[in-house]
Every structure is written in C-alpha cells, then in structure tokens.
Amino acid sequence: MNDFQVWAPDARTIHLVLERSHNLPLNKTDGGWWRLSLPEVTSGTDYWYSLDDGKPLPDPRSPWQPYGVHGPSRTLDHSDFAWSDLRWQPPPLSSAIFYELHVGTFTPEGTFDSAIHKLDHLIQLGVTHIELMPVAEFPGERGWGYDGVDLFAPHHAYGGPSGLKRFVDACHSRGLAVLLDVVYNHLGPDGNYLGAFGPYFTEKYHTPWGQAVNLDGPGSTEVRRFLCDNARAWLRDYHIDGLRLDAIHAIFDSSAIHFLEQLAIEIEDLEAETGRGFDLIAENDLNDPRVVTSREAGGYGLDAQWNDDFHHALHAVLTGEHIGYYSDFGKIEDLAASLKNVYVYAGRYSEYRGGVHGRPVRDLSTHRFVGFLQNHDQVGNRAKGDRVSHLLSIRMLKIGAALVLCAPFLPMLFQGEEFGANTPFLYFTDHQDPALAAAVSNGRREEFAPFGWKPEDVPDPQARGSFESSKLNWRQIEQHPHDDILRWYQSLISLRRSHPALCDGSLDRVDVEFNENDAWLTLYRQSIAVVCNVSSRRLSIFLRFAGDPLLASDPDFAMHGNVVDVPGESVMIVEQTAKRRIS
C-alpha cells in the first residue's frame, strides 16, 4: 500500500502519522478527499490520521486493526496472500443449506484457523454455505460483532485479515461457500470515530442501537460509497461468496434509488468484473417481499431474506411459549399458514405490534426465503441463552428439525443445533469503557421485562463467563443423545438433497393439512408427506396417498394403506408409492 486517502470534507488539515514518528500532511482534492502517495511504505506499517492537529485516529477504511478499535491502523497488501481457489464457484443458492457460525464460540480457541479443523464435520453433515456472524473489528476481545466500528478490518482476536483468508480458502477447497453478516444500519459506540471525519450519521432517523447512518442527507453520496465499497471489499479481497445484511428495516433511506437497490446493482457489476457469483441475503422485520423482488418488477433485487414468521410459528407450536412477539403465534394454523404462504402476517392485524403487518408473497420462489428453528438472535436474545434443546424434548426437537429441512424454504442451522448442544449462547460484550459497560449490562436486564424474565436471572454480558459458557462442547457429538440427534440431522439433509420434491421452489406445489384440536400437521411436497404429531397421544392420520416410509423419528409406527399410525411427539416422512404416482 502506498496511497493514503481519506474522506473528511470539513477538515482544515489532515496529517498522516506513521508509527508515531512521522507527521506528513495530506493534500486536499475534489469532493472532500485528502490524499498522499508514499511508494516507500510497505504492507504492515502502522499509521493514524490527525484531523486539524487533533488526536490521532484510526483510518475509517482501515484494513487491519491489530491492537483493537482504539489502536493504529495497519497497511495491508491483499496481493500478498496466495489463494488456491481461482476456479471456485459457489453452489447455487437454491441448493443451500446454511450453517450460522460465531467464530469466537465455535471452537475453544475461537479463531479462524481453529474453525478450519471443524469444516469436515460440516461437510459430513451436508452443509453447503457457512454464514459467519460479523467479523468486522469490534471493541474488546469478545462480542457478537454487531457493534463493529472498523468495517473493513477482520477482528484481530479471530486472526485478522490473513486468518479470514485462510478460513475462506479452506472452505472453498472443501466445496463450502462462505457468507458474511454485515451491519449497515448502525455502528457500535465504542471506537466509533467516523463522525469525526464526516457526516456519516444523521439525526433525521433513529435506530434501537444508536445513530442512524446518513444515506439520504447532505454528504450521503460518499457514505453510500463507503458502504458499497465495504461490501465489494469483502467479496473481492476476501473471496466471500455473499453477504447477510443485518436488520435492513433499520436502514433508512428516502432516496429515489434506495441504498439496497444500489448495493444490489454494484454487486452485480462486481460479478461481471470477477466472473464469480455473489448472494445478498437480508434480515427484514417488515415481512415485505419487495426486498427480494426483481428490480424490473419494482423490488430491490436482493437474493433472499430470513423468514421470522416461520420461526415464530414453529417455535410457539413446539414450546407453547406465548410471551413477547410469540404472543402473535401459537396455533398450528399459524404454522400451516407460514408453510403455505411464507408469512403468517401478510396484511393481517398483529396484536403484539398493534397494527396490520406484512404483505403477501406472490409469484416468488420459496428459495427467496430462509427458514430456521433457531439462530443467534432467537437463542442469544433469551435471558439465559436457551437453545431449543433446553426447551424441548428430543422427540419435539426432531419434529422441528424435520419441518425446517423439509419446508419449502432454504434451511439454516445455528452452530451446535445439529447435535442438540446444551451449551447456551448468551449475549456477551467486552467494552473497556466502564460507563458503557455498565449501561450495556443494565440495559440487557431491562430489555427482558416484556418477556417476564427476572432481571437477576439475566447473566451479565460483560462477564467473561458469559462468553466462555457459550462455547460449543464438541465432546458431546460422541455422547448420547447428541449422537442420535446428529444422525437425525444428517438423515434429513441427505433426504432433502436426494428428493427433488423437497428442493422445489414453487409455492403452489406446497400444501398443508392440520387438525388444531388433535395437534397434528401434514406438509405435502408433491410426492412427499411430512406427518407431524405434536400431541402426546398416538394418532391415526389419513394421507392423500398410500406411501412408503422414508424416515421416522420413532420406529413404532404403522401404515395401513392411506392411514399412518403415528406415536405421540413424533414425525414420519412418507413417499407416495411409485406405482400410484400421477405423472
């Protein structure tokens, strides 16, 4: 690296501070940019920027923060890394089986390099796409990553830029695609120096987590450029295969071309430049299918989005919980509606929200939606970080897994789910500012009041124990009943990949029958029936066709023509008898 450049439109002077020994002025150019070319500076050099002779600050586009968010930036030459994936192309999104992974808790060491040693487990499981929780530099050594502040720099405690590249290269060598969670709706408060450089934030809007990013006010052109360049950098420099965009409902933009649409256009341009395909997946609380509708049809043109309604409906039926946002769910009818229509709330009144919520999904492939039984939010945003394995019997857990992996959506697992991990996944932070640390700890306790959880039951996110207890215990894989759960997940994934009906993205070829009183539901995927008995009683359930059993969570079942006799709290997957199928 020998070109230093930074956007700071209101600065009077900017000096480059090289390893605290040299103070060199930058030259102001058009558009509020400052530049300086130093051919003699090599990769691995520490530097800061000093605005108007003030305190030296990290580079807003720092590629490397070896000493954390308050330390100097370090130059980096991306061409130094020798990639081995030059012919790599990711699997198509329509075939995806996602695995959400938090680097710091995935292994005891909590690094990119240590995670490489677990990739063969994911291959044997049948995963196609790893989705990393945010790795952009965030405060301290441990955290979820959603309070990142140096968006171009992989977290130093995970192994920095070279560690991430080794991880991605190792994934690609095994046929695994890598998606990265990025946060463009806000930045964390600790170590956030962007506001000192320019109008990166606005008071026009507010997010639940801090200042809103300025995407439609004065100076927003360069702010949008900053975020689009960040997205392109992850995909180009780190060979990431796609991005998961956090909470896009908190990305506020009244421009004629919404930021998300601009991002989709720019990523398509990068595809043309690199010859590689990329995917953009959104988290969206609005139940708005326009996010994944093509731009030609008036949408933003993103590739997929998470389906929270499916999760909420499934969770409420299996656990019986009706607190917080689960109060809108709980009936088998809701679960059936999600399986058949994608959203439960698609123009329907929500008691929890106090208004009509959502928009119907029409003429879209179900491959545009991601379904899950758990994820980092739905586990970590519980007072004690309870996984569904803490809340459900193994029998009910297997029903949930079967519905996720046989549903019409793209399935996603959360780390450890595949073997019923009993370690929690708590919310944890490592803020060094005592006032901020106290505010986070107290705010966490207050957050759970609507759910009825006692403040004293909420672990302190700042305590190191909250982080350590969230690390997966890999020894459980060989222990009972975890080994049995793992075999169940492997069988379901194998079944999904070997039966085209379970991979079909046509919503009009999905049907559901259920009985609320008897507590059963049958999901039909063409020639496949997924028969779920969530009651504790043995039930005889009539099917539309005579079939052959493919997989059952309880071997004590019986079939009599079109009638299947299903034990309580069990699931059975049946394929229509070949000679009776209608072509």
Image: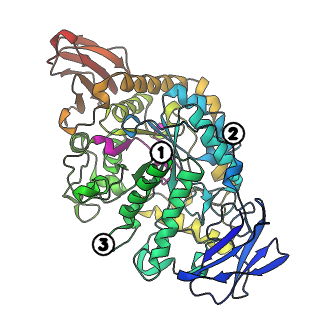
Q: Give the mark nearest the N terminus, 2 or 1.
A: 2
- Circle number at residue 168: none
Q: Position of residue 560 (x, y in %)?
A: 20, 10
Q: Give the mark nearest the N terminus, 3 or 2.
A: 2
- Tell me if residue 148 comes above or below residue 255 in the rendering: above
Q: Residue 407 colored magenta?
A: no
Q: Nearer the viewer, mark 2 or mark 1?
A: 1
The span from disc 2 to disc 1 (Cα, nearest Å) is 30 Å
**Magenta residues (range):** 366-389
Which residue lies under the disc numbered 2? 114
- Circle number at residue 275: 1
Quadrant of res 16: bottom right
**186 relative to 345 in the view: left or right:** right
Which residue lies under the disc numbered 3? 256
Judged from the image, the secondary structure of the residue bearing numbered disc 2 is helix
Judged from the image, the secondary structure of the residue bearing numbered disc 1 is loop
Question: Which amino acid, mark 1?
Answer: Gly
Q: Position of residue 178 (x, y in %)?
A: 53, 43
Question: Which amino acid, mark 3?
Answer: Ala
Residue at position x 23%, y 54% in the image: 345
